[in-house]
Amino acid sequence: MKPFSPSHDRCRRAFSLLEVMIAIAVFFVGAFSVLCLISSSLNNVRRLQRPTVDASPVLAYWSTTNDLKESHYHGSLGEEYLLGKEYRGYDWDLDVTEIATNHLYQLDCYITITAGKPEVISHMSTVLYRPQSHAGTLDGGIGVPGR
């Protein structure tokens, strides 16, 4: 048996307060980084479950016509000529407005989710030149004040 010595007692001391605080800080940094990673992964999963939809298919469809009339149009992205039945829960609204007297039209398209509370998820605009179109409000067509 070894005799008791004060130098032997110093080697068996517990951790200092500073060492414990550093160990706790390292643990929390690791735990928060794992939680952040899990949170971003869950957000990515939610985003993948809902298809990404924008107004470009509607504007592409309307850009193929040579005859535009100033009006408001409405439809569903679930139509076969647009995106098909997988997109039945999405509606589109299109406003056609003549913005110059030379048959220059602005098309504003809004995509909304029809399930639950209607919410606009996409908005796109484009300008089309359609000289074959009927006269708009700026060209003296229907809707001009005083006619």
Image: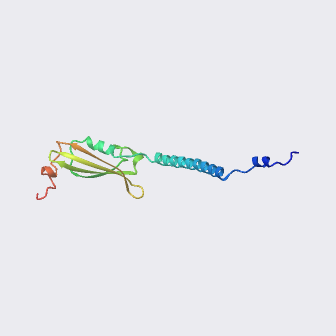
Which residue occupies 20% across, 44% down? 67
Name the residue furthest left: 146
Name the residue furthest top: 64
- x and y percent of residue 86 in the render? 42, 46
In the rendered image, which quarter is residue 103 located in? Answer: top left
Which residue occupies 36% across, 46% down? 54
Taking depth in this image into account, of 32 and 135 the one nearest to the observer is: 32
- x and y percent of residue 135 in the render? 15, 48
Q: Is residue 141 left or right of residue 23?
A: left
- x and y percent of residue 73 in the render? 27, 51
Colour option used: rainbow
Taking depth in this image into account, of 73 and 126 the one nearest to the observer is: 126
Image quarter of the N terminus: top right
- x and y percent of residue 52 in the render? 41, 45
Q: Is residue 20 left or right of residue 74?
A: right
Q: How many marks?
A: 0
Name the residue furthest front: 6
Taking depth in this image into account, of 3 and 77 the one nearest to the observer is: 3
Which residue occupies 52% across, 46% down? 41
Q: Is residue 128 left or right of residue 33?
A: left
Image quarter of the C terminus: bottom left
